[in-house]
Amino acid sequence: MSVRILALVGSLRSGSHNRQLAEAAVKIAPEGSEVVVHEGLAEIPFYNEDIDVEGSVPAAAAQLREAVSGADALLLFTPEYNGTIPAVLKNAIDWLSRPYGAATLGDKPVAVIGTAYGQYGGVWAQDEARKALGIAGGKVIEDIKLSIPGSVTRFAELHPADDTEVVEQLTEVIVRLNSHAAAPAAA
């Protein structure tokens, strides 16, 4: 039985290096793992409790919740915008944190990685995402980290899937997240 890892990408840009990193994860997922990139974060309205009512939850938000419910683990790919997490990713976390007391994240293993132009590879955004995910009910795996600096130059002519070092690091992330997701099933 394969562990299903749902990837959420915090950049909406079609040429995003974080999207490319997520595509690489899909391509290199080792046996026993399946990485699926969730599409549609751009269509989810900003979280508003007035519209988060049973029977009238916006379709894109309901689809996100359903996708997360069907996943064994989550892997978030985040750039860093002005030193923090992109709004689209924070909004997804907000939707997943509800309904209160029954959050869709439901103690699922979650890891946050990414790439950014700066010299630290977006670590501030990743730290902020981990914090929000933990408060929202996810089981954040704090020791799974991957921050790739200098994305604009590093991936200018090379897709992350063709970067040997990135492939090795990304494979390790997936293997470790897979082991966390499979652990409850083995118990």
Image (spheres, rainbow, N blue to C red):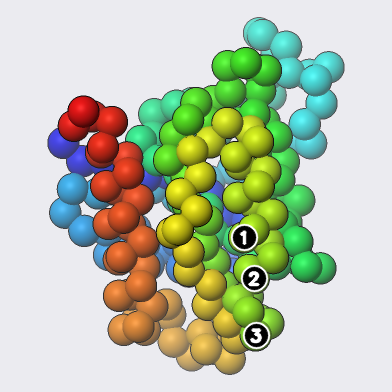
Residue 134 is situated, as x and y percent measured from the top left of the image, at 60, 40
Circle 2 — which element? loop
Amino acid type assigned to the residue bearing label 3 in the image: Gln
Residue that badge 2 annotates: 122
Question: Quadrant of residue 125 in the image?
Answer: bottom right
The reply to whether dot 1 and dot 3 touch (C-beta < 8 Å) is no
Q: Does 16 appear above or below 73? A: below
> Residues under labels 1 and 3: Cα distance?
14 Å
Q: Does 166 appear above or below 23? A: below
Residue that badge 3 annotates: 119
Mark 2 surroundings within 10 Å by alpha-carbon count, few (fewer than 14), some (14 through 19), many (20 or more): many
Residue at image position (21%, 58%) is: 30
> Residues under labels 2 and 3: Cα distance?
8 Å
Circle 1 — which element? helix
Q: Is residue 4 left or right of residue 134?
A: left
Mark 3 surroundings within 10 Å by alpha-carbon count, few (fewer than 14), some (14 through 19), many (20 or more): few
Amino acid type assigned to the residue bearing label 2 in the image: Gly
Residue that badge 1 annotates: 126
